[in-house]
Image: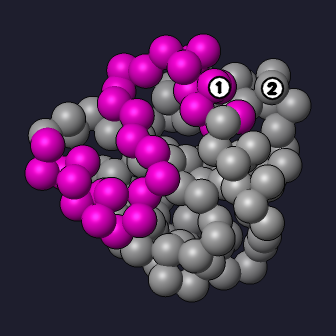
Amino acid sequence: MMILVVEDDEMILRTLEFRLKKDNYSVTVARDGREAMEKLKNNKFDLVLTDLMLPFVTGMEVLSYAKTNLPELPVIVLSAADEEGTIMDAFKLGADDFIAKPFSPGELSLRVKRLLIRYTVTK
């Protein structure tokens, strides 16, 4: 399973990458929204984990692009912004899950696994 992780905070990015690789996923990273868009256009992923606050192109734009062009691709939004409006906007754009920062690596693992199982079964 190939996962695209979009995060501009290097420490969080490394934490996500380490945990997902430990769970035996292949991980591709993007440090900003523009890089994420390029990777989405040129590669096939099974899941996207994206922060909302990103340089160049926002996480909402990454989410919108993914759901418009790759509607079967599950997307988990990560954000320190825990305002209800932000969360609702992400779900309206098609986010499959929302994880508030700081997050528990164990909880992240379970949510990724659950979402991948759900999408794999429905394909």
Report the colour scheme.
one colour
Kindly indicate the quadrant of the structure image that contains residue 79. top left
Residue 28, visible in the rendered structure: no
Kindly indicate the quadrant of the structure image that contains residue 27. top right
Placement of 50 over or under 23, stated as above or below? below
The local secondary structure at tag 2 comes to loop
Q: Name the quarter where the C terminus is drawn.
A: bottom right
Q: Position of residue 53 (x, y in %)?
A: 30, 51
Placement of 37 over or under 121, stated as above or below? below
Q: Mark 2 vs mark 1: which is more N-terminal?
A: 2
The answer to whether marks 2 and 1 mark residues whose Cβ atoms lie closer than 8 Å is yes
Q: Position of residue 42 (x, y in %)?
A: 74, 79
Placement of 33 over or under 102, stated as above or below? below
Q: Residue at x 21, y 39 (%)?
A: 81
Horizontal relation, residue 56 to residue 110: left or right: left
Q: Main secondary structure of the magenta part?
A: helix
The residue sitting at the front extreme is: 122
- Mark 1 belongs to which amino acid? Ser
Tell me the number on the disc at residue 109.
1
What's the distance in space between the residues labelled 2 and 1, CA to CA?
7 Å
Q: Position of residue 62 (x, y in %)?
A: 45, 68
Q: Residue at x 66, y 81 (%)?
A: 41
Magenta region: which residues? 84-113
- How many C-alpha atoms fall within 10 Å of the one at disc 2: few (<14), some, or many (≥20)? few
Kindly indicate the quadrant of the structure image that contains residue 13. top right
The local secondary structure at tag 1 comes to helix
| Residue 104 among those drawn in magenta | yes
Tell me the number on the disc at residue 23.
2
- How many C-alpha atoms fall within 10 Å of the one at disc 1: few (<14), some, or many (≥20)? some
Q: Residue at x 20, y 35 (%)?
A: 82
Count numbered badges in the picture: 2
Residue 84, visible in the rendered structure: yes
